[in-house]
Each structure stands twice: as C-alpha cells, then as structure tokens.
Image (spheres, helix red, strand yellow):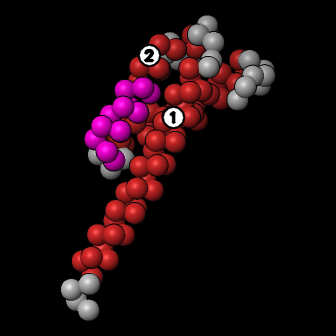
Amino acid sequence: MASAAPLFYLSVVSIINLVLLVFALVVESVAFVHCLTQRSDAFPAIGTLPKGAWLAILGLCLVLTLLFFGPISIFGLIGIAAALIYLLDVRVGLRDITDGKGFW
C-alpha cells in the first residue's frame, strides 16, 4: 500500500497541471483574439496601452506558456495575470467605448 502512494500522487499532480495548462491557454488565447479583433483607436480613448503593446504582451505570454509547458512557471503565472487584467479591465473599457456593440 505504501508503494502505491507515490504513483497516485504523481498522476494527480500531472492531471492538475494539465487542467491548469488548458485553463491558462484558453484564457490567454481568448484575450489575444479579442485584442486582435478590436479597433486600434479605441485603446488610447480608454487610457490604456496601445493595441500593439497589448498584442505583444499577450502573444509573448501565450508563447512562453507553451514553451515552458506549464502555468505553474513564473512565465505562466505572468501570462495568466496579463490575460486576466486585459479581460477584466481593458475589455470592459473597450465595450463601454463601443456602446456594447461588436462581436464580443
């Protein structure tokens, strides 16, 4: 019984890491695609970084999360934070500027 515990532990950890990786990739991809589809003149109107800067930040975070394979790395955590900041702050401002009209 004691020898089966490490095997069970490793499978649980790998499943949790896989779920977190999928979550991180989905959140970062949604933020990147949303930023890609927005008008570039709306970003300065809400007082945030330009569209190119957001695309660079979100794209780099997405690539680093894929390369270092995991949301638990420092790059994965920074990527999740950047995507959530974009989705929870910038996307709301963009939606208010465009009167809620648009694809998203």
Considering every residue shown, the one lying at the far bottom of the view is 1
Location of mark 2 (residue): 53
Residue 88, compared with residue 103, is above or below; it is below
- Write the residue at 44% across / 27% down: 58
Residue 91: x, y in percent? 62, 28
Q: Locate residue 39: give its quadrant.
A: top right
The reply to whether dot 1 and dot 2 touch (C-beta < 8 Å) is no
Residue type at tag 1: Ser
Q: Give the main secondary structure of the magenta stretch.
A: helix
Query: What whole-number distance in Å separates the C-alpha atoms at marks 1 and 2?
Result: 16 Å
Q: Nearer the viewer, residue 85 or 76?
A: 76
For the record, the magenta segment spans 58-70
- Local secondary structure at mark 1: helix
**Residue 64 visible somewhere in the drawing:** yes
Residue 48: x, y in percent? 53, 17
Q: Nearer the viewer, residue 14 or 74?
A: 14
**Residue 74 visible somewhere in the drawing:** no
Count of all numbered marks drawn on residues in the image? 2
Magenta stretch holds residue 66: yes
Residue 45: x, y in percent? 62, 11
In the displayed structure image, the side of residue 68 where residue 81 appears, left or right: right
Residue 8: x, y in percent? 32, 77
Location of mark 1 (residue): 29
Residue type at tag 2: Ala
- Local secondary structure at mark 2: helix
In the displayed structure image, the side of residue 14 where residue 98 appears, left or right: right
- Write the residue at 47% across / 13% down: 52
| Disc sitting over residue 39 in the figure | none
- Write the residue at 56% across / 27% down: 33
